[in-house]
Structure formats: structure tokens, C-alpha cells
Image (tube, rainbow, N blue to C red):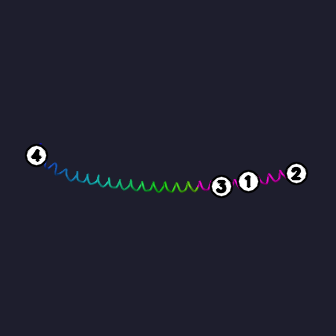
Amino acid sequence: MNADQILPIMLAAAPTMLTVLIGILVNNARLTDFRTDMNNRLTELRADMNTRFNEVGRRFDDMKDLWRSELHRVEEVLDARLKHLEER
């Protein structure tokens, strides 16, 4: 190939290469936006899950306190009945 043949080939290939380069850059920008959006969604999901787990933990603590108070009441009733039986 001589210089006279290379120039037309380069001129014919240049628009194709430029189009491919623009496509790569546009897709890279879209992927970056997608990655940022996914990171934001995951951060929101983690925060929501933490809130829900904290709420469940609070409910368990409330139920534990309720059971303790109920069991304490039952214990007092049983103690009173035993004391009454012992006095007989």
C-alpha cells in the first residue's frame, strides 16, 4: 500500500471510529449515572431496613417488659395463695 491508498481508507474509517467513540463515551456516562442511582437506592434501602429493625427491636423490648410485669403479677398472686394456705 502506498500513501495514496492509505488516505482514502483512513477518511472512510474515521466517521465510523468517531461514531463508535461517541457511543462508548455516552454509554460510559449512562453507566456512571446508573451506578450513582443504584448507590443512592441501596443507601435508602439500608436506612429503611435499619429503621424497621430498630422498630422490631423496640417492640420486642416492649413485649419483654409486658411479660415481666404480667409474670410479676402472677408471682404475687401465687405468693398470696401460698401464704394463705400456709396460714391454714
From mark 2 to mark 4, how far is it between C-alphas? Answer: 122 Å
Quadrant occupied by the N terminus = top left
| Residue type, label 4 | Ala
Secondary element type, mark 4 = helix
Q: CA distance from mark 3 to mark 1?
A: 14 Å
Residue, x 68% and y 56% (percent of image)?
Answer: 66
Furthest-top residue in this view: 1
Question: Mark 3, mark 1: which one is toward the viewer?
Answer: 1
Q: Is residue 81 left or right of residue 31?
A: right
> Mark 2 or mark 3, which is nearer the start of the sequence?
3
Closer to the N terminus: mark 4 or mark 1?
4
User: x and y percent of residue 54 in the render?
Assistant: 56, 55
**Magenta segment includes 43:** no
Q: Nearer the viewer, residue 14 or 86?
A: 86
Which numbered disc covers residue 18? none
Which secondary structure, mark 1? helix
Mark 3 and mark 1 lie on one chain; the one further toward the N terminus is: 3
Going by the numbered disc 3, the residue's amino acid type is Met
* Residue for badge 2: 87
Asked whether the beta carbons under mark 2 and mark 4 sit within 8 Å of each other, the answer is no
Q: Which residue is mark 4?
A: 3
**Label 1 to label 2, Cα distance in Å?**
22 Å
Task: Name the N-terminal-most of marks 2 and 4.
Answer: 4
Under circle 2, the secondary element is helix
User: How crowded is the residue under tag 1: few (<14 C-alpha within 10 Å), some, or many (20+)?
Assistant: few
Magenta-drawn stretch contains 67: yes
Q: Are marks 4 and 1 in contact (CB under 8 Å)?
A: no
Image coordinates of residue 56 in percent, x first then y, are: 59, 55
